[in-house]
Amino acid sequence: MPSLFIRRFSKNNIWVVYLIALAILILALLAGISIGTVKVPIIDIIKIISAEWLPGVPLGGVNPMHSNIVFSIRLPRVLLALLVGGSLAIAGASFQGLLRNPLADPYTLGMSSGASVGAVVTLFFNISLPFLGLFTLPVLSIIGSLFTVFLVLGFARKVDRTMKVETIILTGIIFSSFLGSVISLMIALSGEELRQIIGWLLGSVSMRGWDYIFIVLPFFILGTLILMFNAKELNGMSFGEEQARHIGISVQKRKYLILIAGSTLTGAAVAVSGTIGFVGLVIPHFIRRVIGYDHSHVLPLSIITGGAFLVVADLVSRTIISPSELPIGVITALIGAPIFAYILIKKKGG
């Protein structure tokens, strides 16, 4: 009976779900900008953003300190959390649909491990590429993520020409384990870089600024568009590769597109925020429980909800032990690990 209610709700009143999700996102963004060591009234936030983005709109007596805090520190922080959370969530939703496994997320296939290796190598060897400067870290992280997914796909194709889901998963686990050991080795050998590397691996969107938003935004748009254009194909592949072939889906081509788009989103997110786990696992699972399995709705709602979730997680991470901050990855792990265990138990019929 509950599942029947969910299906009816998703078909006839899906707009209600979108309105609720958008309302939650807006509230999360306003709370993330307003709450902190210095509390900024919401009316001031609206005035500051309007004056900044709409020339000619007066500030109306807003405290200059509040204006600086909002536009220079908190607004880019919450927008970056929105982009990172949305990227991880839609990538997780696409991988779960592709692999037909609710335990799949952007980290299953080794993309995040590849991005992390790129970042750790950059920090460990203090690499700075010409014309990139401070942006060497995110660029090499994205390259590491894309390089890893090509290795995973190439190795899986060597093992099994049909590239079955099970083969891809096992290959991703192998590469994740290997790259994880490389990261551990670099941490063990590091000296002064140790704190910086560990801090980055735990995940954060603190003090990133507008430049990091401009870095992740093109990859976010590109990856999202590719996945949205493949939503119907994801629906078909959710029933199995053989059934998808019977209805005319080019399974291998679509599989490559989805994996590359998901790895691009994951690599860009890891590049600018570090390793933040469980977002791509928890959010798509929650969305499917609410609206069903149609990826034309699961994907956009995952972006909205994933972004709101990470904005709230970041707010908690910087206020729960204020003035100190917890890594945002700690908060997502505390929330995600019990849910992961619950999903695993349900999947095994417990």
Image (cartoon, helix red, strand yellow):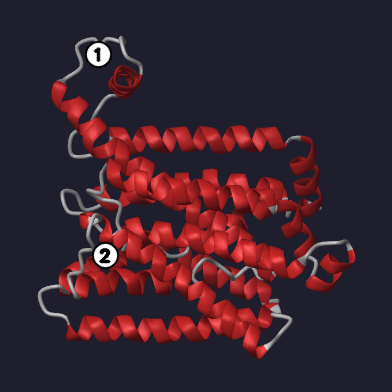
Estimate how packed mark 1 is, as few (under 14), some (14 to 19) or many (20 or more) residues with alpha carbons within 10 Å. some
Going 21% across and 25% down the picture, which residue do you hit? 67
Q: Quadrant of residue 235?
A: bottom right
Nearer-N-terminus badge (2/1): 1
Q: As drawn, which residue projects farthest toward the left?
A: 192
Residue type at numbered disc 2: Trp
Which mark is on residue 59? Answer: 1
Residue 104, percent across and down?
A: 58, 70
User: At 60% across and 45% down in the image, what residue appears?
Assistant: 301
Label 2: how many residues lie within 10 Å, few (<14), some (14-19) or many (20+)?
many
Height in image: 73 above or below 145?
above
Q: Residue at x 46, y 73 (%)?
A: 147
Residue 160 lies, in percent from the top left, at 69, 87
**Residue type highlighted by circle 1:** Leu
- Quadrant containing the C terminus is bottom right
Task: Report which quarter residue 15 is drawn in.
Answer: top right
